[in-house]
Image: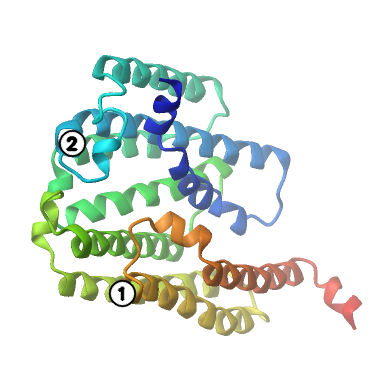
Amino acid sequence: MVRDLITLIRPHQWAKNLLVVPLVLIDTPRLGLGLLGRVSWAVLLFTMVSALVYVWNDVYDRHRDRAHPTKRNRPIASGRVSVPAAYAFGALIATALVAAVAFGPAFPWWPLAAYLTLNVAYSRGLKHLPLLDVLVVAGGFLLRVVQGYLAAGVAVSSWLLIAVFSLCLLLILGKRRHEMAVGGSAHRPSLAGYSVQYLDLLIVLCAAVAISGFLGHVQATIPTPYQALALVGSTPFALFAVARYLQVVVVDGDGGEPTRVLLKDRAMLVNALLWGVLIGGVLLVTQHPALLALAH
């Protein structure tokens, strides 16, 4: 039972919070223990609220999940966790979440409330409406980013929000394309409003906006005289990241688990590492010009 309850809250999906909420650390010139503590607390809060959403979704979708080839093995759909036990577990998570908000660090937590409200609406019907189904999920990631910035007390760049939103849309559309190609539209009603060709067009559109957004964020945050270096140097890394993901989705026929692709694809990881070294080096030299003088 304990193992099934843990499976119910999807620990393998928690990496989403670790990847998105702490984005604010990139834009913070000085990292103190207090700031790291507040951002870590925001990660914990979003992990708890997402766990609550997973429990709610699986209870609400248990009948439909039983007709799905893989989702029928989920704890509630398979009957290993009863509905009353799931409700009790959800109530325990909700209580812990309220306590964490009430007694944790003081910062605005409206993105948590918005995320929870949005996901209730998603489960109750928005998930069945084409386009709205993917926009709502991407909006959840946007709220994660905003929560991280609110916890740190740092203003968030509009360019970054555009980039994250469009990138998340890209990943979600890639997942929808995989579902469409593998199982058709029977198990997800919203897929009836898509076709593989239409999804391909949307993916290309979101890829272009995501690249533009990230480069715009780089240009807006990196001061001169290193702005051109960061912008031009970031361009091939951004293009490769998107091109590699499109290759995985379109050529390899994968993309059903975007988190796994991002965290386990070696080409993506090496690209991210090199890009991080470039941006990290530029930020380091920008904040500590004396380091460049020492190199000479």
Residue 64 appears left or right of 89: left
Q: Secondary structure at mark 1?
A: helix
- Of residues 144 and 12, the one nearer the viewer is 12
Q: Using a 10 Å C-alpha cutoff, classify the residue at mark 2 as few (fewer than 14 neighbours), some (14 to 19) or many (20 or more).
A: some
> Which image quarter holds the N terminus?
top left
Q: Give x and y (percent) for residue 258.
A: 39, 58
Q: Is residue 61 left or right of residue 74?
A: left
**Residue 66: quadrant of the picture:** top left
Quarter of the rendering occupied by the C terminus: bottom right
Task: Quote the CA–CA distance across marks 1 and 2.
Answer: 29 Å
Colouring used for the render: rainbow
Residue 129 appears in view: no
Residue occupying the point 65% across, 42% down: 36
Q: Is residue 83 above or below residue 58?
A: above
Residue 106 seen? yes
Q: Residue at x 25, y 30 (%)?
A: 78
**Residue 206 against residue 85 in the figure, above or below:** below
Left of 129 or right of it: where is 165? right
User: In terms of depth relative to the viewer, which is nearer, 212 or 199?
Assistant: 199
Q: Is residue 138 above or below residue 117?
A: below
Pick whichever of labels 1 and 2 is earlier in the sequence. 2
Query: What secondary structure is marked by label 2?
Result: loop
Viewer-nearest of discs 1 and 2? 2
Q: Which amino acid, by three-letter code, is at mark 1?
A: Val
Residue corresponding to mark 1: 250
Where is mark 2, residue-wise?
66
